[in-house]
Image (cartoon, rainbow, N blue to C red):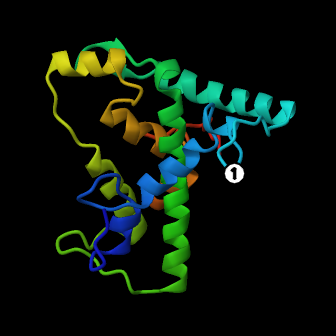
Amino acid sequence: FFDKDAPKYLNYGATNIDSGIGVVIGHEITHGFDDMGRQFDKDGNRIPWWSDATIQNFINRKTCIVEQYSNYTIAQIGMKANGFQTQGEDIADNGGLREAFFAYQKWAKENPNLDKRLPGLQKYTPEQMYFINYAHTWCTKMTNEYALSRLRTDEHSLGQLRVIGPTSNFNEFDRAFGCTPGQGNSRKNKCIVW
């Protein structure tokens, strides 16, 4: 999950055991503030602690995520994703990417010019490499049958949606790559829960 000698954008921006831990931590923290996590207090007791206004605001924001992901089509099998089924994980993916990125930015500000560039990838900024590495960790190839099975039963979105969903909702992704809202993967109306 972590390599002390790797560039920090790799440790902060990845989601698997080979590449880093930042997004994983952010993802799991975000679960503490989703439909399930919000039902428990700091000691693990099942106690409602959100106000009615907070709950309604959360519902409004998560509806944006549900609608966004439900509008994605998995080209490989020609089927729409089910944003309702995956909403908890989609919210956590969006939160994890954001939280880890801001943690990386804080580290980079406190440690200027310490992050090394990887050979052959020097044209990318460390922030761009954070997002490239994040996307790379979700790169998969699967059979049509497996993709269909995952789409129908998994509470997690398929890898491609775990990239395009969170990055399209994140202004810092747009800034890092010079995108304007509505261009390429950048949404004009971004879904931000946390």
Quadrant of image for the N terminus: bottom left
Q: Secondary structure at mark 1?
A: loop
How many marks can you see?
1
At x 39%, y 30%, the residue is 156
Q: Is residue 44 left or right of residue 172?
A: right
Q: Could you say where residue 172 lies in the image, as x and y percent from the top left?
A: 54, 57
Q: Could you say where residue 15 lies in the image, as x and y percent from the top left?
A: 35, 52
**Residue 41 image-quadrant placement:** top right
156 or 132: nearer the viewer:
156
At x 53%, y 67%, the residue is 103
Res. 174 in view: no
Alpha-carbon neighbours of circle 1 within 10 Å: few (<14), some, or many (≥20)? few
**Residue 169 image-quadrant placement:** top right
Residue 29, placed above or below residue 72: below
At x 41%, y 86%, the residue is 113
Q: Could you say where residue 87 lies in the image, as x and y percent from the top left?
A: 52, 28
Q: Could you say where residue 191 lies in the image, as x and y percent from the top left?
A: 61, 36
What residue is shown with label 1? 42
| Three-letter code for the amino acid on which mark 1 is drawn | Lys
Q: Is residue 18 left or right of residue 181?
A: left
**Residue 49 image-quadrant placement:** top right
Res. 147 in view: yes
At x 26%, y 74%, the residue is 122
